[in-house]
Image (cartoon, helix red, strand yellow):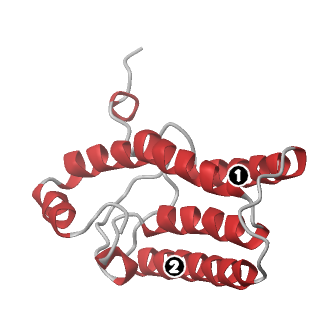
């Protein structure tokens, strides 16, 4: 039996893992490590307010990006085909505002809980997202959209 064209060349980025699972895992590990081996960064009450503001910013960026993608008829799940390059909304400032919001959420939780673990896990998440998701998505988009994506990529930074 011959393999289908979809099996040979799937029309999706072929990411190593689904980003929401990384976020949930990172937050879960962060709270577990905070409980098992607390690494406090501050005793002030100011970080709690700043942390809440960062968390709110993360949610705002996330929803802005999702709405922009839906209006641009682009798929959000990483295992689905992408039919459009979305360059408006938060995608004018970052090629990956959803992933940026995930990192900001971890940082905001770290500030809010005054736990260094969330900062460490956010840094690890940046590395994992870059290697396991973003670089694969970029390769897929370059192959699928060619110069249109390369032009967008040259104008807009990967993160911020």
Q: Is residue 52 above or below residue 153?
A: below
Residue 61, numbered label: 2
Q: Residues within 10 Å of mark 2 (few under 14, many from 20)?
A: many
Residue at 28 percent of width and 75 percent of height: 87
Quadrant showing the N terminus: top left
Residue 117 - label:
1
Mark 1 or 2: in front is: 1
Residue 113 point in image, percent of width and height: 78, 67
Instruction: Tell me the residue at 62%/56% (across/down).
Output: 119
Q: Nearer the viewer, residue 34 or 81?
A: 34
* Sooner in the amino-acid sequence: mark 1 or mark 2: 2
Q: Nearer the viewer, residue 66 or 157?
A: 157
Which residue is pictured at 84% across the width and 45% down the height?
37
Look at the image and tell me in which quarter the C terminus lies.
Answer: bottom left
Give the SS element for disc 1: helix
**Image position of 41 with respect to 122: above or below:** below
Residue 42 falls left or right of residue 16? right
How far is the residue under mark 1 from the one under mark 2?
Answer: 23 Å
| x, y percent for residue 151 | 13, 64
Residue furthest to the right in view is: 35
């Amino acid at each position: 039996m011959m393999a289908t064209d979809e099996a040979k060349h799937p029309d999706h980025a072929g990411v190593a893992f689904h980003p929401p699972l990384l976020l949930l895992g990172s937050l879960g590990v962060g709270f577990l490590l905070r409980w098992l081996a607390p690494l406090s960064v501050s005793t002030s009450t100011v970080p709690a307010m700043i942390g809440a503001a960062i968390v709110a910013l993360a949610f705002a960026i996330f929803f802005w990006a999702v709405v922009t993608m839906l209006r641009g008829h682009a798929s959000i799940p990483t295992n689905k085909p992408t039919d459009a390059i979305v360059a408006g909304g938060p995608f004018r400032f970052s090629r990956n505002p959803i992933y940026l919001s995930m990192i900001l959420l971890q940082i905001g939780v770290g500030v809010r809980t005054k736990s260094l673990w969330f900062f460490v896990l956010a840094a690890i998440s940046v590395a994992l997202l870059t290697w396991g998701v973003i670089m694969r998505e970029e390769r897929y988009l370059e192959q699928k959209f060619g110069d249109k994506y390369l032009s967008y990529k040259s104008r807009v930074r990967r993160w911020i």
